[in-house]
Image (tube, rainbow, N blue to C red):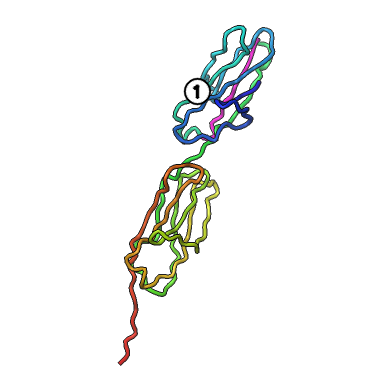
């Protein structure tokens, strides 16, 4: 038994990774067996297809799943081949692997006036990306480097904390947190603040 995708590449243990909305096309090919085996696809215990190619050709069954979604991640697909009711079927199981774009991104601290000369640690969180999102901070389009990034244990959430010293020249500039999955061609999503900076003056008499 050999399972191949629509590009003809053999798949063992995993199929994919597929993007959200993509179509899955797998072909299960079985050689040998007398009488000729019947080939079927299952998801768990659910029969998906039991179509087998006509006599004269290698026994195989094609599985097509359209418009894959987040709920399909790690779904188990099993190809089963049998030609009698006395022995166990020959089978192989694959898990669906997928990649996702981030669903959201948000600067967590409240937007408020900042004081010039003070350092602020500002967190930003993004969730829904697989693999974890790349989070980038920018000030008026210029990238900021002093950040610390962490991911949740399941990899679903990424938190980036920016260490930022406000200056009076930052007043009115945009501070942007953007998240993207670099494995995809989709555009980054972002959240931003418009900075308001308070300056303290020492008055001498």
Look at the picture and state if 34 lies above or below 151: above
Q: Secondary structure at mark 1?
A: strand
Look at the picture and state if 193 lies above or below 130: below
Depth check: 116 or 41 in front?
116
Residue 198 lies, in percent from the top left, at 33, 73
User: Does 48 sit left or right of 204 as displayed?
Assistant: right
Q: Quadrant of the N terminus?
A: top right
User: Residue 142's quadrant in the figure?
Assistant: bottom left
User: Within 10 Å of the Cα at label 1, are there few (<14), some (14-19), or many (20+) other Cα atoms?
Assistant: few
Give the labeled residue for mark 1: 64
Magenta-highlighted residues:
73-84
User: Residue 168's quadrant in the figure?
Assistant: bottom left
Q: Quadrant of the C terminus?
A: bottom left
User: Residue 31's quadrant in the figure?
Assistant: top right
Look at the picture and state if 47 lies above or below 83: below
Residue 139 lies, in percent from the top left, at 40, 62
Q: Give yes or no for residue 130 being in the magenta stretch.
A: no
Residue 189 lies, in percent from the top left, at 40, 49
The residue that appears at 52% across and 36% down in the rendered structure is: 98
């Amino acid at each position: 038994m050999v399972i191949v995708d629509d590009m003809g590449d053999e798949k063992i243990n995993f199929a994919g990774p597929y993007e959200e909305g993509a179509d899955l096309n797998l072909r299960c090919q079985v050689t040998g067996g007398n009488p000729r085996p019947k080939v079927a696809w299952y998801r768990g215990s659910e029969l998906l297809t039991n179509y087998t190619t006509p006599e004269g050709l290698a026994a195989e069954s094609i599985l097509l799943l359209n418009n894959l979604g987040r709920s399909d991640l790690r779904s188990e697909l099993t190809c089963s081949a049998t030609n009698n009711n006395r022995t166990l079927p020959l089978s192989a199981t694959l898990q669906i692997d997928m990649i996702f774009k981030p669903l959201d991104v948000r600067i967590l601290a409240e937007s408020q006036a900042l004081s010039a000369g003070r350092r602020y640690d500002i967190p930003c969180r993004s969730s829904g990306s697989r693999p974890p999102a790349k989070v980038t901070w920018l000030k008026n389009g210029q990238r900021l480097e002093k950040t610390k990034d962490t991911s949740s244990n399941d990899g679903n959430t990424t938190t980036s904390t920016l260490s930022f010293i406000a200056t009076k020249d930052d007043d009115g500039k945009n501070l942007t947190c953007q998240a993207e999955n670099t494995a995809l061609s989709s555009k980054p999503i972002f959240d931003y603040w418009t900075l308001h900076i308070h300056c303290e003056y020492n008055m001498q008499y």
